[in-house]
Amino acid sequence: MTTVTPNLPETVMIRTLDNQVMEVTGKLIDESQVANWMYETHRNTGATGAMFLPVQSAHLRHALEALALCDLDTPHVLFDRDEREAFTQANQPVMDYFHSQPNEAMVGIHSVMDVLSMPRLGDLWIVYFLDLTHQISPEELRELIIMYNLTFDFAPQFAAGTADAA
């Protein structure tokens, strides 16, 4: 699911949390709900200079390397768990890239995906994580859950249903 920002430049200058100025493709703006909003705000206020994105530059570089392996001209359709195998095959270069990265880089990619609200990168990361969980022990899985600061937020209707059944 990409947004389509009219008149988006081919490249955009951004400043990161660690005060690094980077030139990124305008397609990044369409991949991120937060970056899209910040771009529009930056443009509409007449601001000059680099647009601020609240992520670390090293983490953003890893995320951009992963997205460069995707066809960003094709609109993203949210991942459907019944289509996991087809989704994985269609995005095998990204999966290979993710599996080649150290855990610290994957934590950074997760951070960028989360902070910038990037549905395509989020779906790719989820499939990577699901694949990874099948290759490790329960103890290693617990460590990953802690490292990625994952929480399991169950829908209120299920919690209410459980309470009613008690």
Image: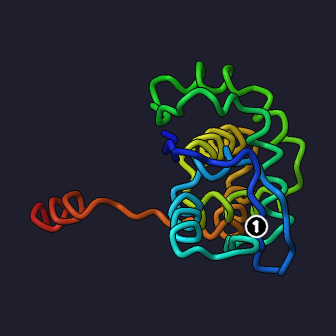
Residue that numbered label 1 is attached to: 14
User: Identity of the amino acid at label 1?
Assistant: Ile
The extreme front residue here reads 46
- Residue for point 58% across, 42% down: 120
Q: 37 or 151, which lies in front? A: 37
State which quarter of the image contains the C terminus: bottom left
Viewer-side residue, 90 vs 64? 64
Q: Secondary structure at mark 1?
A: strand
How many circles with numbers are drawn on the protein?
1
Question: In the rendered image of this protein, does residue 90 appear above or below residue 143?
Answer: above
Colour scheme in use: rainbow
Q: Position of residue 44 (x, y in %)?
A: 51, 69
Q: Position of residue 128 (x, y in %)?
A: 69, 41
At x 84%, y 39%, the residue is: 97
Question: Can you tell which quarter of the image residue 19 is in?
Answer: bottom right
142 sits to left or right of 75: right
Tell me if mark 1 has few (under 14), some (14-19) or many (20+) residues whose alpha carbon lies within 10 angstroms of its own. many
The image shows residue 16, relative to residue 30, as above or below, that is below
The answer to which of 128 and 27 lies nearer the viewer is 27
Q: Quadrant of residue 51?
A: bottom right
The percent coordinates of residue 28 (x first, y second) are 67, 49
At a point 62% along the width and 52% down the height, the residue shown is 29
Q: Residue at x 83, y 58 (%)?
A: 23
